[in-house]
Image: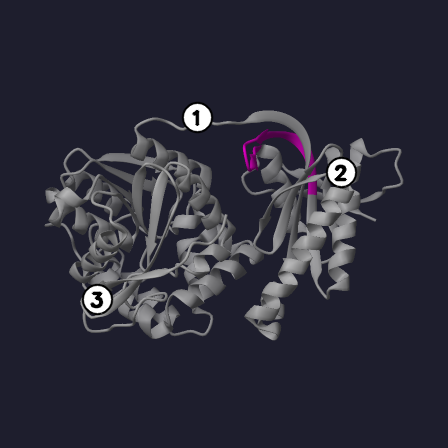
């Protein structure tokens, strides 16, 4: 998906950055939380996946609220009313009269305030992991701990632990979102935003929300109290409440398929019809190791050029081995093959080619049934391959027992790495390393 051009909407004396993309007949205004960056969010594969899904049925509008991302910095007016004004300025600039408003955490409060104070400007409201009051009221000890953590050098990593705990356990994903967090706000800006988040209270506003509303809560969340979300739903007349899998409150760390399906059904009025078919396939995941350090050494321009070379050589290797590149995922590649031996050999080739560029790659391979869509794949086999890759070190090709058994008789040999618990998979899985 091509990254859309960034534009600016005037709001009082400030300029608010926004992007608009998608070709559907509906409009969706997305406020992804306390802070954002419309340019760097495209570095998150999960965000791109969500944007691609939403763009099929709607025009999607992203924006950075004042004092965040690439909107103008401003410290004097960071109230909910000011954030509502920013959203309205973007809506007017884009020319959308009545979009569906989607917001998470603090962004949900802003979107609810917009819906309540400008009822003719909202076609609906989806609130992800919202709360009625700020953390100072609902979770004072947690609020104090977050304030202390923002003063630390590793504060972005600590924020990942709060907002996307499942990603915190994956060093690659943790690294990506930490880099993203560094672009959305400085520590000083983060403290200003936190002050608003901790002190705002919209209990008097929510009963005036007249538009249809869906409140969504990640059922395994321990970061915020669920009572805040339930109170949010109960205060809005007729609001629906739905729990979804997961522990994250960060928009792009939700299960993207579940989130996209839910938004599509709410916006269009009907559940999405999956254009998929199930096939037996071998799935290969690759990912770069220590990419943050290399990116820091080289600088953005040189790193982007090197990453493009790596992706090009990886796609060529997949094609030479009879596979198909499904998509590139930030620093890695997702590909499918008709047979496991082809996938394993391709993984070795990608690792070798990356080495010639001064890069280190890890990879995971699994064979199973996958759902093939128009431009993506899904299913248990995809998750297993991704989890196996997460166990690999630099230069390693790890595979499932299914792959090992299917290549018996070939020149390929594997070493037993024992059984491992794969996140989201009920039973331990034997894992093997290519020798």
Q: Nearer the viewer, residue 82 or 366?
A: 82
Badge 3 density bin: few <14, some 14–19, many ≥20, Cα 10 Å = some
**Helix, strand or loop at disc 1?**
loop
Q: Tell me how far mark 3 sits from mark 2, CA to CA.
A: 55 Å
Residue that carries the numbered disc 3 in the rendered image: 78
Percent from the top left, x then y, of residue 128? Answer: 31, 45
Q: Is residue 337 magenta?
A: no
Q: Is residue 369 magenta?
A: yes
Q: Tell me how far mark 3 sits from mark 1, CA to CA.
A: 41 Å
Residue that carries the numbered disc 1 in the rendered image: 273
**Helix, strand or loop at disc 2?**
loop
Q: Nearer the viewer, residue 25 or 395?
A: 25
Q: Which residues are magenta?
A: 365-379
Badge 2 or badge 1: first in the primary sequence: 1
Asked whether residue 289 appears in the rendered view, the answer is: no
Q: Residue at x 37, y 27 (%)?
A: 271
Tell us which disc is closer to us: 3 or 1.
Answer: 1
Main secondary structure along the magenta-highlighted residues: strand
328 w.r.t. 37: above or below: above
Residue that carries the numbered disc 2 in the rendered image: 322
């Amino acid at each position: 998906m091509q990254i859309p051009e960034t534009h600016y909407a005037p709001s009082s004396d400030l300029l608010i950055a926004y992007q608009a993309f998608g070709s559907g007949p509906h409009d969706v205004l997305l406020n992804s939380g306390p802070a954002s960056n419309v340019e760097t969010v495209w570095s998150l594969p999960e965000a791109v996946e969500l944007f691609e899904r939403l763009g099929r049925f709607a025009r999607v509008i992203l924006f950075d609220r004042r004092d965040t991302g690439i909107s103008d910095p401003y410290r004097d007016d960071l109230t909910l009313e000011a954030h509502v004004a920013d959203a309205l300025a973007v809506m007017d600039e884009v020319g959308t009269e009545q979009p569906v408003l989607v917001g998470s955490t603090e962004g949900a409060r802003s979107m609810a305030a917009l819906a309540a104070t400008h009822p003719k400007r909202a076609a609906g409201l989806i609130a992800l992991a919202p709360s009625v009051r700020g953390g100072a009221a609902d979770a004072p000890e947690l609020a104090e701990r977050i304030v202390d953590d923002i003063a630390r050098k590793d504060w972005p990593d600590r924020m990942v632990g709060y907002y996307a705990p499942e990603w915190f356990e994956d060093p690659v994903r943790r690294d990506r979102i930490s880099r993203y967090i560094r672009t959305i706000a400085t520590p000083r800006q983060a403290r200003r935003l936190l002050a608003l988040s901790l002190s705002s209270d919209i209990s008097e506003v929510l009963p005036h929300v007249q538009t249809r509303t869906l409140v969504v809560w990640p059922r395994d969340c321990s970061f915020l109290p669920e009572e805040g979300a339930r109170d949010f739903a109960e205060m809005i007349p007729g609001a629906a409440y739905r729990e979804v899998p997961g522990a994250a409150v960060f928009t792009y760390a939700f299960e993207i398929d579940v989130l996209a399906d839910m938004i599509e059904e709410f916006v269009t009025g009907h559940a999405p019809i999956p254009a998929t078919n199930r096939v037996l396939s071998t799935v290969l995941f690759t990912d770069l190791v220590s990419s943050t350090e290399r990116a820091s050494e080289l600088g953005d321009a040189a790193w982007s050029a090197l990453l493009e070379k790596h992706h090009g050589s990886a796609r060529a290797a997949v094609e030479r081995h009879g596979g198909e590149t499904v998509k590139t995922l930030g620093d890695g590649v997702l590909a499918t093959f008709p047979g496991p031996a082809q996938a394993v050999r391709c993984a070795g080739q990608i690792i070798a080619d990356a080495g010639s560029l001064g890069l280190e790659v890890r990879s995971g391979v699994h064979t199973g049934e996958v759902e093939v869509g128009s431009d993506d794949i899904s299913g248990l086999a995809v998750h297993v391959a991704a989890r196996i890759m997460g166990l690999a070190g630099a230069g390693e090709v790890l595979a499932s027992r299914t792959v090992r058994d299917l290549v018996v008789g070939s020149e390929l040999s594997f070493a037993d790495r024992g059984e491992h618990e794969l996140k989201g998979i009920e039973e331990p899985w034997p894992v093997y390393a290519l020798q």
